[in-house]
Image: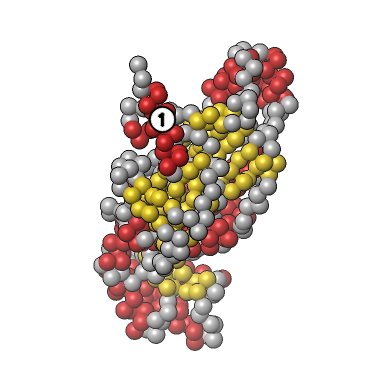
Amino acid sequence: MDRQNLTLMTDLYELTMMQGYFKSKNDKTVVFDMFYRTNPSGGGYAIAAGLEQVIAYIKELKFEKEDIDYLASLGIFEQDFLDYLSTFRFSGDIYAIPEGTVVFPREPLLKVIAPIMEAQLVETAILNIINHQSLIATKASRVAYAAQGDGIMEFGLRRAQGPDAGTYGARAAMIGGCIGTSNVLCGQLFDVPVKGTHAHSWIMSFEDEYTAFKTYANLYPNACILLVDTYDTLKSGVPNAIRVFTEMREAGIELGYYGIRLDSGDLAYMSKKARKMLDEAGFPDAIISASSDLDEYLIESLKLQGAKITSWGVGTNLITSADNPAFGGVYKLAAIQDEDGTFIPKIKLSENSAKVTNPGNKTVYRIYEKETGKIKADLICLADEKYTENDFILLFDPNEPWKKTKMKPGTFTIKELLVPVFIKGECVYNSPSVMEIRDYCLKDQDTLWDETRRFANPHEVYVDLSSKLYDIKISLLDEMSKD
């Protein structure tokens, strides 16, 4: 997975279209937008992730001899096109919203400006990378929000859909808000904290539960979380854990990160009982962690029930985003450059109005209420439109344009979301570390209203079009609807 050549990780039709463009001498520069239409899990937002891997993919994008030989063996590509591929390098521009940013439907997460053959080839890999990591980062942010500040550890590797999904999914989960992962390869590749305790098999391999606990505590006195539900949680597991903690304290061993883990049963009931037992034994700072098929909904429910859990291990439902296993991002042509360098807007029509695209070479501005620092709206506009905090900004719903809000200077702050990543084929962007992205992501989530973060019927953040872009879109729709 490190420095892997993913050039052939593409759909066949990308290559057959490329050959068609090549044969017809169509080398026009185009604009493609990568965006999504619906927030995952019925939520009010998503988290952008995966850009670092897109950058690595573009940097490594080249057809090796074995790639050319394989394509030749398919019998559908002509030699002059294969010769072209043998010298292929990406030469275009890419703009993207930085990883860890809160994002919303219909706005470009990534924009490619390049000759059409190049822009076409990179579609599949960009979608694969951004869709997967944005999905898992979003799920992690929801789980972390439900935990209300408690630590979330990702440990879904064994249930992920393969090594890549497990490792890059763990990376995305860290971005979304997890404090650590059980995935050691992810820890090595991305310098993130790795955490773990022990399995039931550790307990079962000893002559008794106490001996298993005692042996583990002797090995790891500074990270002693004991799994207490192998035999009987309240009659055996917790009492044996208390016995070990007491012996450690009596031996002068400072108890730092220590406690118990619950992995089955009624977690609310068990945690309350265990908390009482630990407190009465003189261990009020002992951690009670929990696992067992957790997700944001169950964690929220357990919190409402008064569960005394302060650390959560989330596996399958996080790493697979079990309730919403696909992000649904798409990659659509938005403009074609004419001979004088002007980008001619293009639009895709559909019987489904949600699938009608926004035309043109665009950018995105985020507008915040100055008083609260919360997001007021996102504004999609043409790339040559500029907005500052000294302007009056008109916001209106593009689906119901009579609903309007006028933002006065001094009442808002604003920033452009899309930043340059590649210019003329050269990378101009330095990716932060995963932990830096995580910190940024946590701060960016604070700009959301609580009403947008709730799981049931979240408030929708407005994603509006500038008047100029809206007029172009309506004009194209009117033109295309003529007989």
Q: Residue 278: image x %, image y %? A: 37, 79
The residue positioned 34% from the left and 45% from the top of the image is 397
Q: Residue 384: image x %, image y %? A: 56, 42
Q: Which residue, given by chain and number where applicable, does mark 1 sit on?
A: 475
Q: Nearer the viewer, residue 147 or 412?
A: 412
Q: Residue 67: image x %, image y %? A: 67, 25
The residue positioned 50% from the left and 38% from the top of the image is 34
Using the rendered image of the protein, determine whether residue 264 is visible from the camera's viewpoint.
no
Residue 82 in the figure: left or right of residue 395: right
Q: Tell me: residue 39, above or below residue 273.
A: above
Q: Tell me: residue 253, above or below residue 69.
A: below
Q: Tell me: residue 72, above or below residue 103.
A: above
Q: Which image quarter holds the N terminus?
A: top right
The residue positioned 40% from the left and 78% from the top of the image is 242
Which corner quadrant of the image does residue 313 belong to? bottom left
Q: Tell me: residue 269, above or below residue 34.
A: below
Which corner quadrant of the image does residue 435 belong to? bottom right
The residue positioned 30% from the left and 73% from the top of the image is 272
Q: Nearer the viewer, residue 455 or 216?
A: 455
Count up the numbered dots: 1
**Way the structure is coloured:** secondary structure
Under mark 1, the amino acid is Ser
Q: Nearer the viewer, residue 152 or 415?
A: 415
Q: Which image quarter holds the C terminus?
A: top left
Secondary structure beneath label 1: helix
Using the rendered image of the protein, determine whether residue 302 is visible from the camera's viewpoint.
yes
Q: Residue 192: image x %, image y %? A: 58, 59
Which corner quadrant of the image does residue 433 belong to? bottom right
Residue 360 in the figure: left or right of residue 421: left
At label 1, counting other C-alpha atoms closer than 10 Å, the crowd grade (few under 14, some 14-19, many 20 or more) is: few
